[in-house]
Image (tube, helix red, strand yellow):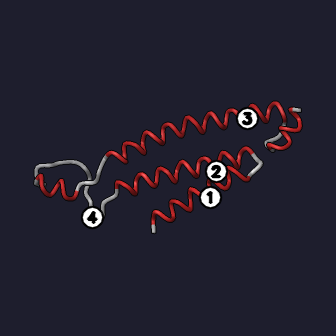
């Protein structure tokens, strides 16, 4: 069920990215898609009743292997968050420059003004 919700969230972001004419709404759609991918990666690494991937003296190695959550998806999500922050900052900076030049965020109007 959770995978379906993540897929629906991705489709909402894709819909906003493809159909909207406002640059800000397109950027928000890209943000929604990026966060749905992050949620998917976290769901892939989730284990019901799992424990943090830290081995301590009280836990035996067999119990740790059986119950520990995979830390790789968590590391991928942290990396993805940093990369998405950079891409979002770049998209917002470009949108601000476009607004300064054309005075609008509407893509159709920008194409018309560009000639």
User: Which of marks 3 and 1 precedes in the sequence?
Assistant: 1
Q: Residue at x 64, y 49 (%)?
A: 28
SS for callout 2: helix
User: Which of marks 1 and 2 precedes in the sequence?
Assistant: 1
Is residue 92 positioned above or below 52 on the image? above
User: Which of marks 3 and 4 precedes in the sequence?
Assistant: 4
**Residues tagged 2 and 1 counted as in contact (Cβ below 8 A):** yes
Is 26 on the left or on the right of 87, as rendered? Answer: right
Is 66 on the left or on the right of 92, as rendered? Answer: left
* Residue ID for mark 2: 29
**Residues tagged 1 and 4 counted as in contact (Cβ below 8 A):** no
Q: CA distance from mark 4 to mark 2?
A: 33 Å
* Residue ID for mark 4: 49
User: Which of marks 2 and 4 precedes in the sequence?
Assistant: 2
Q: CA distance from mark 4 to mark 3?
A: 46 Å
* Residue ID for mark 3: 96
Is residue 114 positioned above or below 78 on the image? above
Q: CA distance from mark 1 to mark 3?
A: 24 Å
* Residue ID for mark 1: 12
* Marker count (numbered): 4
- Closer to the observer: label 4 or label 2? 2
Q: CA distance from mark 1 to mark 4?
A: 31 Å
What crowding class fits label 1: few (fewer than 14 Cα within 10 Å), some (14-19), or many (20 or more)?
some
Q: Residue at x 56, y 62 (%)?
A: 8
């Amino acid at each position: 069920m959770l995978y379906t919700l993540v897929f629906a969230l991705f489709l909402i972001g894709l819909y906003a990215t493809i159909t909207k004419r406002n640059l800000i709404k397109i950027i928000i759609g890209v943000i929604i898609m990026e966060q749905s991918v992050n949620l998917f990666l976290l769901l892939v690494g989730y284990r019901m009743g799992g424990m943090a991937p830290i081995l301590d003296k009280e836990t035996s190695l067999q119990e740790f292997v059986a119950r520990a959550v995979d830390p790789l998806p968590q590391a991928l999500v942290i990396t993805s968050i940093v990369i998405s922050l950079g891409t979002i900052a770049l998209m917002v900076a470009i949108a601000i420059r476009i607004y300064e030049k054309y005075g609008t965020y509407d893509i159709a109007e920008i194409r018309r003004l560009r000639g």
